[in-house]
Image (tube, helix red, strand yellow):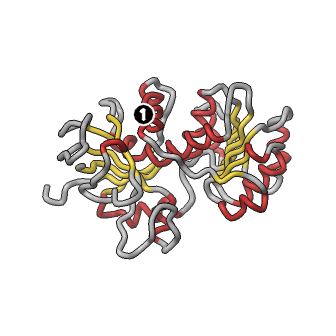
């Protein structure tokens, strides 16, 4: 696969810093990256259903920060012509994590869902999928710019910090049915005060706190079917993926620092040009 774009995820930053990865042992030097979009350059055994020259997007555990990557044919889906390369490169990771979370928390019409870090990559997609299912979404985020951004997707924004629980209760007097934490410990603890059913509270950032609070570690159950569902929603106009910044592959360190800053909306994506021209 000739890579055209690769999204930068928080797990990539954790691996870079020597942290533990969920699917593989971290040994340096390490090529990170778990999502990509590109063009099929060659087919190996078992490549049925994919043609050379096809534009696709897909996923794997690592190695996508590269000019080329080898990936099972069953882990890619066709890229729509109307989907830009940067969006395609950054959709799989955040998109599938959000899709998994909304599904696992059983978000349905009439629910009220609280999303922490709602303006981030995962949060942005989770808000839109939940709204597509007919749920009311309260999105926790910092700053009026992020609040305005969330309103574009039909979320009701609420500000982080001291007094969050009281602000959410004022915003949702009927109560909160489920909560997705993509921010960290404070958001997860607040969710425990707001949601009655612990099985409808989930986190993608605080696995160590799950056992103490009796809530769910969500992770991401990735599949081509799940990714295809996201692509279909995008084509239908029901999903917007905001790419806040792109960097050439040779400036991957800058992209890491951007994500590690913890600020900004949406995704950071690397754009890959062949070094040989």
Provide residue 211's location: percent of width, then percent of height: 74, 60
Furthest-left residue in this view: 276
Provide residue 246's location: percent of width, then percent of height: 38, 52
Is residue 87 shown to the viewer in this render?
yes
Residue found 65% across the figure and 54% down from its top? 217
Quarter-of-image position of residue 231: top left
Does 17 sit left or right of 5 as displayed?
right
Q: Vertical placement of 257 versus 166: above or below?
A: below
Is residue 145 shown to the viewer in this render?
no
- Numbered disc total: 1
Q: Nearer the viewer, residue 174 or 44?
A: 44
Helix, strand or loop at label 1? It is helix
Provide residue 100's location: percent of width, then percent of height: 57, 42
Residue behind mark 1: 228
Residue found 22% across the figure and 43% down from its top? 40
Residue found 52% across the figure and 69% down from its top? 20
Residue found 73% across the figure and 43% down from its top? 200
The 10 Å Cα crowd at callout 1, few under 14, some 14 to 19, many 20 or more, is some
Provide residue 95's location: percent of width, then percent of height: 50, 42
Considering the image in quadrants, where does the C terminus appear? bottom left
Q: Vertical placement of 83 versus 248: above or below?
A: above
Q: Vertical placement of 181 versus 223: above or below?
A: below
């Amino acid at each position: 696969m000739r890579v055209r774009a690769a999204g930068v995820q928080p797990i990539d930053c954790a691996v870079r810093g020597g942290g533990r990865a969920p699917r593989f042992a971290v040994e340096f030097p390490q090529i990170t990256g778990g999502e990509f979009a590109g063009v099929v350059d060659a087919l190996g055994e078992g490549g049925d259903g994919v043609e050379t020259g096809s534009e696709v997007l897909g996923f794997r555990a690592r190695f996508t920060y590269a000019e080329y990557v080898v990936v099972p044919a069953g882990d890619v889906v066709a890229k729509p012509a109307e989907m830009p390369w940067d969006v395609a490169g950054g959709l799989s990771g955040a998109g599938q994590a959000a899709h998994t979370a909304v599904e696992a928390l059983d978000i349905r019409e009439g629910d009220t869902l609280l999303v922490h870090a709602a303006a981030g990559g995962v949060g942005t997609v989770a808000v839109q999928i939940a709204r597509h299912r007919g749920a009311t979404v309260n999105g926790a985020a910092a700053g009026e710019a992020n609040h305005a951004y969330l309103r574009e997707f039909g979320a009701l924004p609420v500000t982080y910090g001291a007094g969050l629980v009281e602000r959410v209760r004022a915003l949702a007097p009927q109560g909160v049915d489920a909560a997705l934490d993509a921010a960290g410990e404070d958001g997860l603890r607040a969710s425990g005060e707001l949601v009655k059913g612990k099985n409808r509270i989930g986190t993608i950032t605080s696995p160590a706190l799950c056992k103490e609070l009796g809530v769910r570690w969500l992770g991401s159950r990735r599949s081509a079917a799940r990714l295809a569902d996201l692509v279909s929603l995008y084509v239908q106009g029901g999903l917007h993926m905001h790419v806040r910044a792109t960097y050439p592959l040779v400036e991957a360190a800058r992209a890491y620092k951007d994500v590690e800053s913890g600020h900004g909306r949406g995704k950071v994506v690397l754009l890959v040009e062949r070094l040989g021209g």
